[in-house]
């Protein structure tokens, strides 16, 4: 691990091998992705396994199998996240920019809805629900069993429909400039009313409540958020350009905020409505009668790795095919140029090389560049080989302004960079890269699914069954309880607290969010403040959420109280921080956190004989909203007035 964290050594190693700059940059990119997944998975695994060893003197049941699963998860996430950059995002960006030029706004909203449904299936964390379905006891939670096992595909579809509606609302918000707080009220009120009916109107639906609210955390992952934001922002900018709006030329750091919140709330509502529908369609006797009979034969499609590969194909292929069809037959445009090489590195090299050298566009066909014609201020992306060749006769140049004075060395370096970039020859064509990117996505998702079954679910389930034994006598642990009641409770809550802290601190999106907040507040709300406010909120949320499973605390009161506090704090905050705080709940529940937490919750429920183990994510996803808004209020009404006090002293 020590060597893995030394990025510069790895870059030097690649350079010593004689690799070109773009190959070094690409290798470093994969290195960064791998380290990112390691830093997310390894600390959590060490915490959970260490808790088993230190507090209970037990190890994992199958160490080789567990290690295999974790390695598969790390490599799989690395490949899958990179495939989004290579294949999915270029088409999403193109659709966002060009759809308003060929479709009306209602038709665009229809496209956004379809993409919202498809990206849900492509989310890695959505697969974490499948292993938990077989652990539900139909006699204790009949409608949860019905939704998760007998109607699993429909339940996932309902989650996707919720994300689809969120994509439509988010796009409308980007285009119309709607305020965020009214949208939160309009989506949260029906969700809370449905939750109240499920708790008090039909007690048989109570076990389904935790699943419904946890689904809001499952949806906001590495596929849904960037694809929908790219589509919404692209549509907004193009519509503003067509209207001649000054907003089209402005840069807003908050562009894209808000869609994560909507994608977290609307799936909750849809799953709740589906659960209510089930009670009018099936009686409890029907649910019991529809249980599949026990069988000793196992289909090849239910064995690893065929099962994981099949699920990966079903998740990735529909989204990929629909994006291609939209570009080719709706936009009637060539596909964007697909390349494994990094766009930002290529643009930086071309910008340096353009001082004062004019570069022909055809020299950059192998790169994903944005080339500016000197007759227009609109960027024309090098989107395809045929398109690039058709524009070659226009002789565009990379326009970056005049060369600064006393820049002889810089000019010589730029000329060398230009020569190096002219020597660039892509290893594969765009079509080949597209195929390889698709294989990368399918392979990455397959490996991640293997990691779910052999790594995440295994560790989480074992830890979850041990934690209650710290203070309760459980059937699985003959020597339990291991500690006095108060000490055991502190151990159980403490493990969940630190699990939340480590999982949140490792989220890369949180650091990006912290940088935006620091910029917006001009340093008064630092990145450090936001990151640790969110970490504290998630940690407290997980510790509180597990009490619902361990002690039977009513989930409905957690939902009502926490959202009442969040809404009350939002009334005294600004639009900027409302968007940031409510979206911060989504960035904390990535594809690593969700499986670990869900498996741990289900393990706890088995140990204490609870009907189900959902609800921890529900609490973990809202406390960050409260902590960030509270920190903002303290900053504005306590810290800031104190800072101004010396200025008011005439002395």
Image (spheres, rainbow, N blue to C red):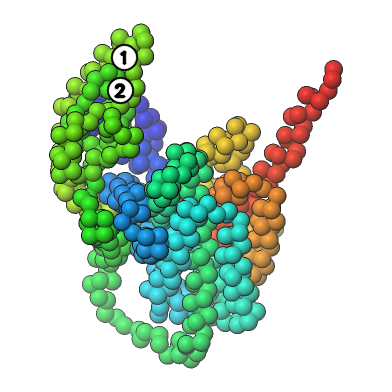
Where residue 80 sits: x, y (%)? 31, 51
Decide: few, some or many residues near mark 2? Use Cα within 10 Å; few <14, some 14-19, many ≥20: some
Label 1 Cα neighbours within 10 Å, binned few <14 / some 14-19 / many ≥20:
some
Residue 159 picture quarter: bottom left
Residue 51 lies, in percent from the top left, at 53, 52
Quadrant of image for the C terminus: top right
Q: Is residue 312 above or below residue 407?
A: below
How many numbered discs? 2
Q: Is residue 14 visible?
A: no
Q: Which residue is mark 2?
A: 352
Asked whether residue 119 appears in the rendered view, the answer is: yes
Residue closest to the eye, 215 or 413: 413
342 sits to left or right of 458? left
What is the quadrant of the N terminus in the image? top left
Q: Which residue is mark 1?
A: 410
Give the answer, above or below, for where 263 lies relative to 239: below
* Residue drawn where x is 36% and y is 63% of the image: 107
Label 2 with label 1: CB-CB less than 8 Å: yes
Alpha-carbon distance for marks 2 and 1?
Answer: 8 Å
- Residue, x 40% and y 64% (percent of image)? 106
Q: Residue at x 59, y 77 (%)?
A: 198
Left of 640 or right of it: where is 443?
A: left
Q: Nearer the viewer, residue 267 or 237?
A: 237
């Amino acid at each position: 691990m020590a060597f893995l964290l030394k990025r510069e050594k790895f870059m030097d190693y690649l350079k010593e091998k004689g690799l070109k700059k773009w190959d070094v940059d690409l290798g470093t990119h994969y290195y960064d992705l791998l380290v990112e997944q390691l830093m997310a998975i390894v600390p959590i695994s060490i915490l959970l396994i260490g808790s088993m060893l230190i507090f209970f003197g037990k190890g994992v049941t199958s160490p080789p199998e567990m290690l295999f699963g974790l390695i598969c998860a790390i490599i799989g996430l690395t490949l899958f996240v990179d495939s989004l950059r290579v294949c999915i995002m270029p088409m999403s960006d193109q659709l966002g920019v060009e759809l308003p030029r060929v479709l009306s706004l209602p038709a665009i909203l229809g496209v956004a809805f379809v993409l919202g449904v498809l990206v849900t299936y492509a989310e890695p964390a959505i697969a974490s629900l499948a292993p938990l379905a077989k652990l539900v006891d139909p006699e204790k939670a009949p409608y949860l069993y019905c939704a998760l096992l007998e109607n699993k595909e429909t339940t996932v579809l309902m989650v996707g429909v919720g994300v689809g509606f969120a994509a439509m609302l988010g796009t409308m918000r980007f285009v119309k400039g709607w305020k965020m707080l009214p949208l939160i009220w309009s989506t949260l009120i029906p969700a809370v009313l449905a939750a109240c009916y499920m708790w008090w109107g039909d007690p048989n639906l109570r076990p389904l409540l935790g699943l419904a609210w946890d689904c809001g955390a499952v949806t906001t992952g590495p596929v849904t958020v960037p694809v929908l934001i790219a589509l919404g922002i692209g549509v907004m900018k193009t519509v503003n350009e067509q209207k001649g709006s000054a907003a089209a030329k402005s840069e807003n750091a908050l562009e894209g905020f808000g869609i994560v919140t909507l994608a977290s709330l609307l799936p909750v509502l849809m799953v709740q409505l589906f659960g209510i529908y089930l009670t009018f369609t099936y009686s409890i006797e029907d649910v019991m009668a529809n249980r599949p009979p026990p069988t000793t034969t196992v289909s090849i499609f239910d064995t690893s790795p065929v099962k994981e590969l099949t699920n990966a194909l079903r998740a990735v292929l529909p989204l990929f095919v629909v994006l291609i069809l939209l570009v080719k037959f709706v936009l009637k445009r060539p596909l964007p140029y697909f390349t494994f090489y990094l766009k930002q590195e290529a643009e930086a090299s071309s910008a340096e090389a353009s001082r004062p050298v004019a570069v022909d566009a055809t020299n950059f066909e192998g790169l994903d560049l944005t080339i500016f014609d000197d007759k227009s201020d609109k960027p024309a992306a090098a989107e395809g080989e045929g398109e690039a060749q058709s524009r070659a006769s226009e002789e565009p140049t990379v326009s970056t302004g005049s060369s600064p004075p006393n820049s002889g060395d810089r000019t010589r370096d730029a000329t060398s960079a230009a020569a190096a970039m002219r020597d660039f020859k892509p290893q594969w064509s765009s079509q080949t890269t597209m195929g390889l990117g698709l294989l990368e996505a399918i392979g990455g998702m397959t490996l991640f699914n293997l990691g779910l079954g052999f790594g995440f679910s295994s560790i989480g389930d074992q830890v979850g069954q041990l934690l209650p034994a710290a203070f309760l006598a459980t059937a699985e642990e003959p020597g339990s309880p291991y500690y006095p009641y108060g000490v055991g409770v502190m151990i159980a809550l403490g493990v969940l607290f630190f699990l939340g802290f480590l999982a949140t601190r490792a989220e890369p999106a949180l650091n990006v969010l912290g940088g935006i907040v620091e910029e917006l507040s001009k340093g008064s709300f630092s990145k450090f403040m936001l990151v640790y406010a969110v970490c504290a909120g998630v940690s407290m949320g997980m510790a509180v959420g597990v009490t619902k499973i361990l002690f039977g605390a009513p989930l409905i009161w957690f939902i009502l109280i926490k959202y009442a506090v969040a809404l009350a704090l939002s009334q005294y905050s600004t639009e900027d921080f409302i968007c940031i705080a409510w979206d911060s709940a989504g960035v904390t529940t990535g594809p690593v956190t969700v499986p670990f937490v869900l498996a741990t919750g289900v393990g706890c429920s088995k140990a204490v004989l609870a009907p189900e183990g959902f609800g921890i994510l529900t609490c973990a996803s809202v406390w960050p909203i409260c902590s960030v808004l509270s920190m903002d209020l303290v900053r504005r009404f306590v810290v800031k007035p104190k800072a101004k006090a010396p200025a008011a002293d005439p002395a």
